[in-house]
Image: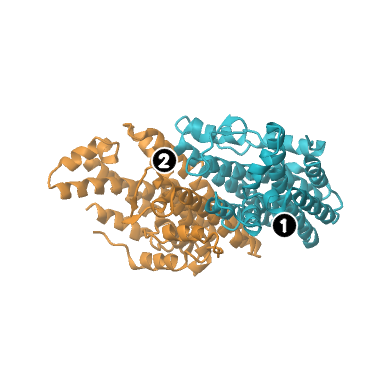
Chain colours: A orange, B cyan
Amino acid sequence: MAQLGNEYLALKKLVDDHVLDYFPKLDERTKVLSDSMEYSVTAGGKRLRSVLCLSFYKMAEEGADPAFALPFAAAIEYIQTYSLIHDDLPSMDNDDYRRGKLTNHKVYGEDMALLAGDALQSLAFETMLSDADKCDDPVMKARKVKAAFEIAKGTGTSGMVQGQVADVKTVSQNCDYATLRFIDANKTGAFIKSAILAGCFLGGADQKLIDAAALYGDCIGEAFQIVDDILDIISNVEELGKNTGVDAELNKSTYPALLGLDNAKKRVGELLDTADDAIAAFDRYGIARDITKFLRDEIN
Amino acid sequence: MAQLGNEYLALKKLVDDHVLDYFPKLDERTKVLSDSMEYSVTAGGKRLRSVLCLSFYKMAEEGADPAFALPFAAAIEYIQTYSLIHDDLPSMDNDDYRRGKLTNHKVYGEDMALLAGDALQSLAFETMLSDADKCDDPVMKARKVKAAFEIAKGTGTSGMVQGQVADVKTVSQNCDYATLRFIDANKTGAFIKSAILAGCFLGGADQKLIDAAALYGDCIGEAFQIVDDILDIISNVEELGKNTGVDAELNKSTYPALLGLDNAKKRVGELLDTADDAIAAFDRYGIARDITKFLRDEIN
């Protein structure tokens, strides 16, 4: 099992320690709302997007204190959590468990899960806007606005939600490589990239760094998805002790099914090479190369 | 039937004409998303919140062009529409019709209605943040950030969504006056007030005007809800030709039930007097007095 490095784990701890700092204090009549939001926000996970945001912020600005970017890291986790709560609802994937815990609607009911998701999206923007509003320095305020706008774009109609729609509309259909790329690039890639770019904007990165970060984001977004598909096959093979796992997976529209397992692994290698090259534009690499190494280790 | 004035109708037309200006152009694979969003955004309604935003913007700044505030008016309508789409879902009110048209999930399915609502909330913040991001004047940028933050607060965890939660949790329970006020002040009042304050912030209103606008917003938010309850009773009485409508209504937790019909009307009068007095702080009244007059006419 591949491991993430110490810098990644330190940033993840920072997010875990502060992710509830921006929660409202509600009175008894509506405390169930913040309870249900907290239940899912603290349900675990790698905190990949928020850690990327904090790390690229540090990479863009020498001596940057990641605490400055915490409202954005928290907002990113609120959006990620809202998307998972809504994705698990009966009208979507109808999942009872996520990461070994009951899903939000199984604990709090469908109506509360719907509202907890709505509230988390709202709280994300409230948190970023509050931070931008109280900032008196016009340069820093402009950076915060640009970062929040980037996250809105990556997670909305032209990004994550569009990807969800494409996924819902093609589910149980065999789709071609271009459609699979379209779904994943929007559903997961756009948010990962926007979290990275938000970090760059907060750190005042110039256009050269922004372009490099965008390319890195595109590459690791795609690589994560292909690696996920490959790991599904490998774990099925190990679990069943034979190759039926592969056969079953190859009937679904996954990267290994469409490219072949070897070509899928080769594609991951190419993407990670491009990502590593792109990141050379920065003076500091932060966790960027930890992540490419982690992804290489996952499938080797 | 009371009528809204010409200035109200002109601002409403401005909103109706431009409410789709900030919609994304999606490709064939996901066009159903923007179709379902458009279906509900253009399904009618008074556009009360966005018209209030535009009008208070004009009231706060002499010679202000309401077109400047259109991204905020559109964003307000996106949030209002998302809240209605989600409110109509089977796990919430389970409504098949709204304003004589099939509800979003009856046309597009529950999964798409969920995603269309999510996307509209996202698009609201994307639209406001895009407008703030591209603004080069630091004073105007700061105003836009403050306005967007105000809308996030009024419609989120401490405002509209909290009100929805309180409503869901007390439904079919008799509640007392304080709880009814808590529900309505959050569910509808907070958004109305935040739309008004957003207009004031965009127009650079000073603290005296902001306080006056906040008081006006509180009063008309409450008055609208009491008037709605009174109209429900009056229309039931007219429809049934006898007073059973009143009796039926009086068993539910409504303002007339809790205060008595005459006291409810008296309370509306007091609220509208306070609203009119508050608005005297402004040099221009815009539609503010049209609205108090409209509400007086509705129940007399």
What is the number of the mark on residue B139? 1
What is the number of callouts on the image?
2
Q: Nearer the viewer, mark 2 or mark 1?
A: 2
Report which residue position mark 2 lands on. A91
| Picture layout, residue B250 above or below residue A71 | above
Label 2 to label 1, Cα distance in Å? Answer: 45 Å
| Picture layout, residue A26 above or below residue B200 | below
Left or right of residue A12: residue B218: right
- Of A243 and B170, nearer the camera is B170
**Looking at the image, which residue sits at the far left?**
A241
Chain containing the residue with disc 1: B
- Near mark 1 (Cα within 10 A), the count class, few <14, some 14-19 or many ≥20, is few
Give coordinates of residue B34: x percent, y percent: 53, 34
Q: Tell me where residue B78 sits by quadrant.
A: top right
Task: Name the residue at 71% across, 53% down.
Answer: B259
Give coordinates of residue A126: x percent, y percent: 58, 57
What is the number of the mark on residue B72? none
Local secondary structure at mark 2: loop
| Residue type beneath disc 2 | Ser
| Residue type beneath disc 1 | Val
Which quadrant does the C terminus of chain B fall into?
top right
- Of B69 and B227, nearer the camera is B227
Give coordinates of residue A88: x percent, y percent: 39, 47
- Near mark 2 (Cα within 10 A), the count class, few <14, some 14-19 or many ≥20, is some
Chain containing the residue with disc 2: A
